[in-house]
Amino acid sequence: MKNLLSLLMATSLLVACGQGGDDSAATAPQEPMLKGRMAIDEASYEGHLRTLSSDEFEGRGPASAGEEKTIQYLVEQYKAIGLKPGNGDSYVQDVPVVEITADPSTSATIKGSGDDLTLTYGEDYVSWTTRVQEEVNVTESELVFVGYGINAPEVGWNDYDGIDVTGKTVIVLVNDPGFATQDDAVFGGNAMTYYGRYTYKYEEANRQGAAATIIVHKTEDAAYPWSVVESSWIGGKFSLQTENDNADKLAIEAWIQEEDARTLFDRAGLSFDDMKAAAAKPGFKAVSLNQTFTSTIKNSFKKLVSRNVVGVLPGAKKPDEYFLYMAHWDHFGVGAPINGDNIYNGALDNATGTAGLLELAEGFATGKPLERSMVFLAVAAEEQGLLGSKHFAENPTVPLNKVVAGLNMDGLNYYGATKDLEVVGFGFSELDSYLERAASNEGRYLVPDQNPEKGYYFRSDHFELAKFGVPMIYPGAGIDHLTLGKEYGQKKADDYVKNDYHQPSDEVKDDWVFDGAISDLRLFYDVGLMIANSGDWPNWVEGNHFRKIRDQSMQ
Ligand SMILES: [Zn+2]
């Protein structure tokens, strides 16, 4: 039902676009614009994909020998395609990162309301700091429960209203009140919003002046089990290097298991369930747990440089306006062996997207000149927390308010052409209508995210540009296989998640076929083509969090 509603909304959006002014894409002649378009070369796509995901490229880990090979390959291809350097006279943008490894022998002590309570690292909680310091301390910092930790002025919701958390340790729930209530009128209902992501919780708590932030983990709310938190938080983690070594960031970022959080509430004489329910309602007030948090993190760190690769195809009429295609080139590199294989090839994730990026660049470079310019951005260190795209967004090589819109590719179809195409974050921006048009020209149809509660829109690189207001569309793959149907496509998609996602077995398999990726790339191409040859400035839809940011950036 929800899907049907979203589709209806998209249809009315198309109609709305058609009523726009002279610049509206919908009023422009459609057919001629798409005539003579590229035939994306399947053999060439497959060649890039096989090369990038070969063992020789060692899984493309950041700042590794595999990175060196990848960057060389991409720069060679950009040159051969005829792209201009996108960062001054270079195709490369340095991304300074730091790998921080916390000593796992750390612990945390809760004081007040009875005997001291010790939380065991890994078992009860995990913690980290982005501060590049050998030792980071938080000492007897008051624990405050701030509900979902959301400050959303556009909907008049502020969990920090009336409380000063400077120097305090905030305990915060993951996800958002919409998920808790399943009320579509509240924070998008079941679908996770930007405010539901853990990264937002830390960022907002830091803006509020907190010393430490502890997110309460619950599998359904987070969309992944504690084991994922454990495996991704224990051991080395990367952050961007900054001039002040992240001294202005939270001292401690942590997660706690829900049962341990319950203990803290019990000790304060509060019911966790009651407080959680209250946090999902408007007018929630933050409450002190009358206990303090004390912890020391001992770090070792390594400063490294990874690299984005950026090329530009200058437009003929409006060269200072851009459409941007992006894909992350990195994966996990060489790591712990599984079934005797220690190379995390990242064939689907994201040699497919990177190969697609090269094919799109080639297609545009060999096609008719465009009015606007095109940027082709292969970003680094996505798997380490979207770091390459974050660095690009903070240090853009072209002004972000001149980037009309963009499209991100992270994992393309490997099981054959489909009638449908999933759009993650469907309904967020007016870009849907362009993709919708491209799809219907091919007799294909769009479907909204199949798992909006997982917040995938906020988990890949385009999100870092969206945070600065740039309208970004993030298509996934379809499942409605041309000849074998939806069940087949769904099974293939599920199989990948179950068996190969972030595993050394993410390799090009004998049964992989590429016509699906090629037909999807044609649609991605058409979206860029329509926008590059128009005067359109598609925006976020009314009420979307990023719209105000965009509007302000355009002034
Ligand atoms: Zn990826």
Image (spheres, rainbow, N blue to C red):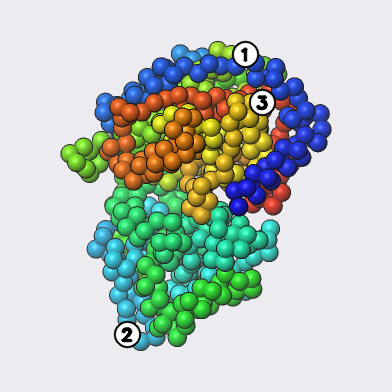
Inter-mark Cα distance, 3 to 2: 66 Å
Inter-mark Cα distance, 1 to 3: 13 Å
Instruction: Inspect the image, locate mark 3, and give the three-letter code of the amino acid beneath it.
Output: Met
Between residues 512 and 135, which one lies in front from this camera angle?
512
- What percent of the width, then of the height, locates residue 84? 53, 18
Question: How many residues crowd mark 1 within 10 Å: few (<14), some (14–19), many (20+)?
Answer: few
Quadrant containing the C terminus is top right
Between residues 437 and 425, which one lies in front from this camera angle?
437
Q: Earlier in the sequence, mark 3 or mark 2?
A: 2
Question: How many residues crowd mark 3 within 10 Å: few (<14), some (14–19), many (20+)?
Answer: many
Quarter where residue 316 is shown: top right
* Visible residue check, residue 436: yes
Residue drawn at the location 54% of the way across and 66% of the way down: 180
- Mark 3 against mark 2, which lies toward the viewer? 3
- What percent of the width, then of the height, locates residue 385? 43, 46
- What percent of the width, then of the height, locates residue 249? 47, 56
Q: Earlier in the sequence, mark 1 or mark 3?
A: 1
- Mark 2 against mark 1, which lies toward the viewer? 1
Q: Label 2, on which residue?
A: 115
Judged from the image, the secondary structure of the residue bearing numbered disc 2 is loop
Q: Label 3, on which residue?
A: 530
Q: Label 1, on which residue?
A: 36
Residue drawn at the location 55% of the way across and 24% of the way down: 522
State whether residue 200 is above or below residue 173: above
Residue drawn at the location 76% of the way across and 25% of the way down: 28
Residue drawn at the location 40% of the way across and 76% of the way down: 262
